[in-house]
Amino acid sequence: MIKFVLLAFLVAGAYGCGRPTFAPVVTRVVGGEDARPHSWPWQISLQYTRNNNWYHTCGGTLIATNWVLTAAHCISSRNTYRVVLGKYNLKQEEAGSVAIPAATIIVHEKWNSLFIRNDIALVKLQEHVTLSDTIMTACLPDAGAILLQDEACYVTGWGRLYTNGPAADTLQQALLPVVDYATCTQPDWWGSMVKDTMVCAGGDGVVSGCNGDSGGPLNCQGSDGSWEVHGIVSFGSGLGCNYPKKPTVFTRVSAYIDWINNAMVNN
């Protein structure tokens, strides 16, 4: 962990992780809403190319100036990817936003798409991005950290606004209270599908992650006020985006700190 902290310090320069220039407007009101522009400056858009056009497919989190954290299920060997940073509205040109091709993509070696296990991947950018007021890194949690029941965290992304609805143009944020492991693994919740390498949030029937949010962060504020990426959007209910007792399930980042550090150091 010390090694990663030092690495993050060296690449972050004047911009510390998890401390946006434009602080997010966070409330206890559960429900999706437009985020304050550039208030989640580590949020990225992972895009693939078809017929000379680029399309948003997943979210992700900038954790170093040339590394992005996303979900393994977002990656296909058939596609060519780029990472777009500093964006708020995906349909508009925005000053300060940049698009950088993916140089290397590392999918967890034990990723299992059938049982949705180890749904985590890293994207190394072809070049380091310059940090700014609109492009910053998120902090990583301590290894093994466990979120408490009902802890207030926020999911962000450009996913569908509602079940089978249109994808958002502007970055959305939604309060997702954490559901602890004991609750989320109850038979009428997710049961045995959820493992201790995952974290659940939402599931109250009001709001959850939706298609297109995949790979994006579950943002939780640490005791020092900085924002940490505690989860990577992994899966939700096939019955809809806001189904009761079926919270969004995230890959628990704190279970993979050693894997993240080793991948970054060795690649």
Image (cartoon, grey):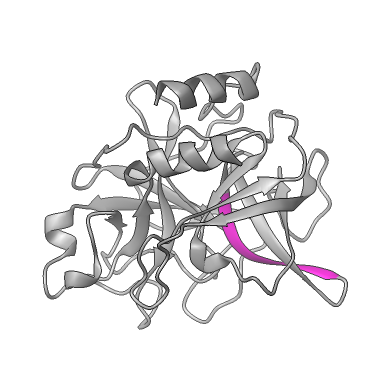
* Residue pictured at 26% horizontal, 64% vertical: 204
* Residue pictured at 65% horizontal, 18% vertical: 13
Give the quadrant of the C terminus.
top right
Q: Compare residues 159 and 131 and report the one nearer the observer.
A: 131
Question: Is residue 107 located in the magenta-colored stretch of the structure?
Answer: no
- Magenta-highlighted stretch: main secondary structure? strand
Q: Which residues fall within the magenta stretch? A: 53-60
Residue 127, percent across and down? 77, 39
Residue 255 vertical placement versus 81 (above, below): above
* Residue pictured at 74% horizontal, 35% vertical: 129
Query: Is residue 243 toward the left or the right of residue 37 in the image?
Result: left
* Residue pictured at 30% horizontal, 59% vertical: 202
Query: Is residue 77 toward the left or the right of residue 252 in the image?
Result: right
Residue 87, percent across and down? 71, 48
Is residue 214 in sight in this rendering?
no
Residue 134, percent across and down? 69, 35
Query: Is residue 84 toward the left or the right of residue 7 in the image?
Result: right
Residue 229: image quadrant is: top left
Residue 51: image quadrant is: bottom right
Give the quadrant of the N terminus.
top left
Residue 173, percent across and down? 49, 52
